[in-house]
Image (spheres, helix red, strand yellow):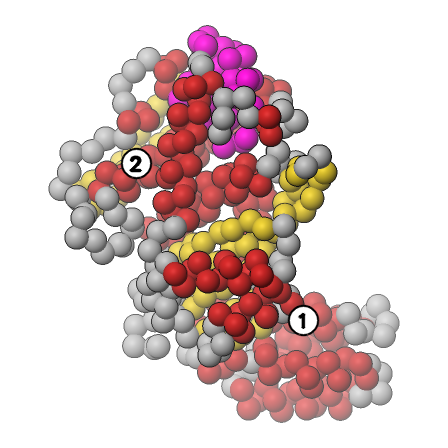
Amino acid sequence: MNSDNKNYDIFIDIFEMLKNQDEQSLRSIYELIFNSVMRLERENAINAGPYERSDERNGYSNGFKNKILNTRVGRLELKVPQVRGLDFYPQCIEKGSRSEKALKLAIAEMYLKGVSTRKVDRITEQLCGLNFSSTQVSRVAKELDEQFEKFRNRPLNNFPYVTFDAQYTKVRRNGSVIDVATLIAYGVNTEGKREILGVSMSVSEAEIHWREFMESLVKRGLSGIKLITSDNHNGLREARKKVFPTVPWQRCQFHMSQNAQNFAVRRDQRKEIGQAMRDIFNASSYDIAIVLKEKICVDFEQKAPEFVRWLENNIEEGLTCFNFPRSHHRKIRTSNGLERVNKEIRRRTRVATLFPSIESALRLVTGVLIEIHEDWVTGLTYLDVSGNL
């Protein structure tokens, strides 16, 4: 980010945003930034990511220790990362004056929000009673970019289950406002934990963009895929066929149910068709699902013939999950896991109704995804894959 970055001139005045938020919202934002940066510091210190096997590892993650940090916005409840085998303490909460700590945090937040560096002096003076140069802001920006780039390009390995999805973000580009596609992938690793595999922003969901994204995952080492789950978007479908031609595909059952309801002849028929789809998907076996499909086709042959034709041509794509352990079905048969991720991204970025650039949007989304990723890999096992795949 250059000190006179003109791309940020039209961005929302973050000072007004902060000023109008209640104290609890400010504390939540600050806690998020602090905890995220501390986890990244630990990863850099031990020279390895969570559960990463590396000969260069300097130590081992050892949980977190609660800490209260007093700031001008109140008491922050932080989780300080602990390390075994290495003397480590996060630099972002090293000993220093309250103003210095608040200043570091304000700069990190402003950078993540995409604020113009020329607004920094006014904002930091209000927050901390200090001035801060755009050169110093640019240095912090560079450090954050390096950390985020490292996350987006970290090596991958075996992930039996992989899910793809996208959402759209409004971005200003060349004087116009466009909807930019955020392409996201997550996977379930061989230990049954979920991980964010990658994120990319493109001007659309065209096949070329999805293909480049998928190919980048393969180059980073993504392998061992047993099943891919996604919706039936044209670009995604064609890219998947080219990059992963032999991997079985599970078409998202949730999206299929929504698609099916579009064939309703009357409004009140939508509910009936939705229930029919759920009956098929909730069957105890593939054979029973097919029997139910045949019965539904007979029931709707006269009252919704287009739905019947669509069902006969598409239902197999939604039943691939029956080839996998039944205990896994609920979590592999839809892309709802990523739908929830997208909802969290929208919740955390709603204050920025328009991003000044694709880079700004990707930066903030990456920060949110790192938070989610860390929660996943340090949390409970998502799927029991031992001996099942």
Q: Nearer the viewer, residue 241 or 47?
A: 241
Q: Quadrant of the C terminus?
A: bottom left
| Percent x, y of residue 177 | 71, 40
Residue drawn at x 66%, y 80% as measured from the top left: 314
**Residue 266 appears in view:** yes
Q: Nearer the viewer, mark 2 or mark 1?
A: 2
Q: Alpha-carbon distance for marks 2 and 1?
A: 44 Å
**Quadrant of the image occupied by residue 299:** bottom right
Residue drawn at x 49%, y 32% as measured from the top left: 112
Q: Nearer the viewer, residue 197 or 50?
A: 197
Tell me the crowding category of disc 2: few under 14, some 14 to 19, or many 20 or more residues within 10 angstroms, Cα based. some
Tell me the crowding category of disc 1: few under 14, some 14 to 19, or many 20 or more residues within 10 angstroms, Cα based. some
Magenta region, mostly helix, strand or loop? helix
Q: Secondary structure at mark 2?
A: helix
Q: Which mark is residue 109?
A: none
Q: Which residues are magenta?
A: 102-131
| Percent x, y of residue 127 | 49, 14
Which residue is tagged 1?
257
| Percent x, y of residue 225 | 40, 71
Kindly identify the amino acid type of the residue bearing the numbered disc 1.
Answer: Ser
On whether residue 216 falls in the magenta region, the answer is no
Q: Which mark is residue 41?
A: 2
- 114 vs 375, left or right, is right
- 307 vs 250, left or right, is right
- Of marks 2 and 1, which one's residue comes earlier in the chain? 2
Q: Secondary structure at mark 1?
A: helix
- 381 vs 47, left or right, is right
| Percent x, y of residue 117 | 52, 21
Kindly identify the amino acid type of the residue bearing the numbered disc 2.
Answer: Glu
**Quadrant of the image occupied by residue 76:** top left
Residue drawn at x 45%, y 66% as measured from the top left: 162
